[in-house]
Image (spheres, grey):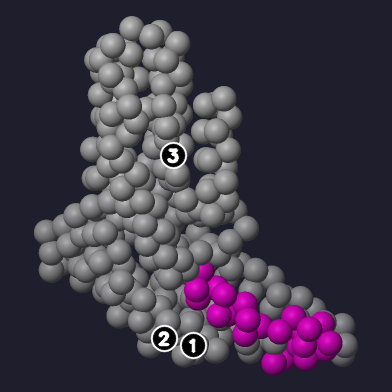
Amino acid sequence: MYAFLCNLTDLTYKMQGLTVIYVPREGSDLTEEDSLDKELVKRLESVVAYWTTQIRITLSDQDQATPNELLCLKDEYEFWIYRHDNLTGLNHQLQNPTVNRIAEFLLISHSTYARQFLSLKDEIEDGVIEAKSNIEYLRILIDPSAELDKCTTPSSIEEHLMLIIHLFRTIWLNSPFYNSHERIENLFKALNNQIIIICRNYIDLGELFAGKTRSSIEKLEECVNVCENYKSLYDKIALAHNILTNIPWDLNRDNIFQHIDIFISRCHDLIEICQAMIDIAR
């Protein structure tokens, strides 16, 4: 029965993006004598084992990316807000007197499940601290990212890029948790996605295939130019960073610009198609 109720509670709230544990009423009035009841111990162990699994899954849930989404800087910020709220809520649940009573009861019963469970409580508190810190640092990207989202042409993108890249540097140099290569590279990838989305919306494939090839070529070349200029700006800032600081700029450039390079390649493909349409029409 407890296994069913744990599953039901977990699935019900998981659909809302929350981690909620099922706390059996049976655990509210335990005594030391109850530790001799092997069936009771076994039932409560099954509950605590499920809690432990839920907590481990929640703690490991640090990757918000999904294959079909182009995640942007705002998405990364909102993910950490969600993670902070979820971990804070879970931490609050674990302060429930009944939860603590069950854990203490199983410790008295020499259950290994209780030790595993209690060891994860500290990790949750650490996760809350990490999420709160990441929110504070990522918050500085929200306004510049919003301004970038207002761009409707590739030419209007470039004026925002230097500030955003320098803010990435600020996070990299100062954040106690967000200063890993992987996370900073992911910020660049999120910025890349915003640039690609703006360029994608600027290119009208309907016009292209309707025969407006010359104007389409101009738009495609604009998109290519802004992407190439972005890469050049990145290189200049990386060089200045290496000259002025003791922390090497050793991010994986190929990994960062993988999607940008693919987008540039697709633009060149479309330019060739447009040129072929012009040649055929002569």
Query: What residue is pinned by disc 1?
Result: 150
Residue 61, quarter of picture: top left
- Comparing 166 with 227, the one in front is 166
* Type of the residue with mark 1: Lys
Q: Secondary structure at mark 1?
A: loop
Instruction: For label 2, count other residues whose C-alpha is less than 10 Å away and answer few (under 14), some (14-19) or many (20+).
Output: few
Q: Is residue 265 visible?
A: yes
Outermost residue toward the right?
281
* Type of the residue with mark 3: Ile
Mark 3 or mark 1: name the one nearer the start of the chain.
Answer: 3
Question: What residue is shown at x 42% (from left), y 65% (from top)?
Answer: 78
Q: Is residue 232 left or right of residue 154?
A: left
Discs 3/1, front? 3
With respect to residue 102, does 174 lie above or below? below
With respect to residue 98, does 85 lie above or below? below
Q: Position of residue 116 (x, y in %)?
A: 31, 24
Q: Is residue 126 left or right of residue 46?
A: left
Q: Which mark is residue 147?
A: 2
* Type of the residue with mark 2: Glu
With respect to residue 81, does 152 lie above or below? below
- Comparing 114 with 82, the one in front is 114
